Image: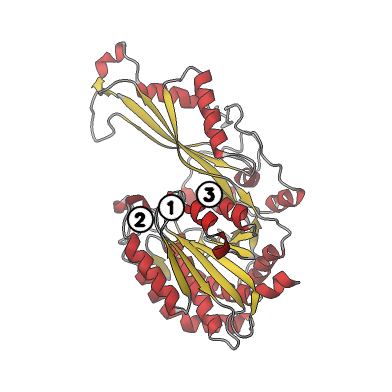
Amino acid sequence: MNKEQVIGIVQENLPHAIEKLMQYLRFPTVSAQHKAIPETVEYVVKMIHEVGGETKVLDNLGGNPVVYAFFAAGSEGDASKTILFYDHYDVQPPEPFHEWNTEPFNPTIIDGKLYARGAADNKGDLVARLTAIQILQQQAGGLPCNIKFLIEGEEEIGSPNLEPYLRAYKDLFQADACIWEFGGKDENERISMVAGIKGMAYLELTCVGADIDMHSSVGAYVDNAAWRLIQALATMKNQENEILVAGFFDGIEEPTADEKKVVSELPFSEEATAALYGLKRPLITAANHVDPREAMVFHPTMTICGLDSGYTGEGAKTVLPKSAKAKLDCRLVPGQDPQHIMNCIEHHLEKHGFTDITVTMINGQKAYRSDFHHPFVAHVLDTARVIYDQEPVLSPNAAGTGPMYIFGEQLKLPVVSTGVGWVGCKVHAPNESIRLKDFEEGIAHMVVMLSGFAKALSE
């Protein structure tokens, strides 16, 4: 089928797909708040069964259930080739509610955009993929290959229980390649895909100075937990935003020449980025004369995600806080180990006299990059060119994090991430959305990609 034929068939199936997605988005599946998990799992299973798939709900190893789905190759398909889709049914908390223009779990279409929590991350992609399967089943010969899904319910809290399931059910999820959960168009309407992902060491630093909050007048002679934590944090990064923790960069794998070349050619606009986020200061890469594209893909980070201490309500309350906490997010590149990062930070604090500050690991994941020369990577890129008007963009890895390393380690397969998002979809923020045109094109891309998958891996 050519592009016009594929788009025509997708448009015939689009109203039903949108309705199915809107039903799915009504479930407030917030894993961080333990909400709507059983009913969402039930609906996911129902969607798969409606498209003719088999399912197993795996819930014997802790955490929220993992849904396995299987669709057999059709009569003219290649049953020796299997593709795996990774998705998740949980979403981020919708707060702050007052910043939403619509109800976060009442999906609303305005000017061609569908607004709801989870629309872009990741419920829209799951429905797009199931719709592509349904379209291919309607064609002579049926599905061109075997198709599997792993759909988990804890991605938004760091996938803490996924690894045991992948280890225990490795044979069940075995496949030749994997399409990851996310992707979308950039500010120039180019579909942006990645073949890897950064890791993470998400830490909580806690300083306790007393049993109770005190009157601020005792600040004349009592140490302040908030100041102490701030002083400790200030030793870890300088004003040029260089990370000063000894051992932090241990083990980093040097990117290949091909990866460096690809990253140097990635589109990037400082002006567009500043406008998108309303930035008030220059990019931190300017001071060190570093290419933002290189930093985004190849450099680890250390970010203070949150600070909590004392009184932060309206008006004044003169207290000296008993304690202070900071959330620290370190995005890692291949070769770095989350536990080693935590150990380095603990040693750094001890070295600088902050032995009273405790460090707790909240989430640790390693980075992963697929082989850029694998034929599957080229196939996803080539099939994107069939559907999208602009030349697609493929990066060695995303700046964000997910459990991709576990898939690579356990299943030994290449991974490419692509999806139905767009530069303004506001993932994890109020007013999350997808554009219906992108949803349509995302379905069409999956139809074309699946159609040629077996052949691309056989050549």
> Which residue is labeled 1 in the image?
156
In the picture of the structure, the residue carrying the numbered disc 2 is 30
- Residue 154 is left or right of residue 422, and the answer is left
Q: CA distance from mark 3 to mark 2?
A: 18 Å
Q: Which label was assigned to residue 401?
A: 3
Q: Position of residue 365 (x, y in %)?
A: 53, 45
Image coordinates for residue 393, horizontal then vertical, percent? 64, 60
Task: Name the residue: 52% across, 56% down.
Answer: 168
- Few, some or many residues within 10 Å of mark 2 (<14, 14–19, 20+): many
Dividing the image into 4 quarters, which one contains the N terminus? bottom right
**Three-letter residue code for mark 2:** Val
Residue 152 coordinates in the image, percent (x, y): 45, 59
* Among the 4 quarters of the image, the one containing residue 373: bottom right
The alpha-carbon separation of the residues under discs 1 and 2 comes to: 8 Å
Q: Are marks 1 and 2 in contact (CB under 8 Å)?
A: yes
Q: Residue at x 61, y 54 (%)?
A: 408
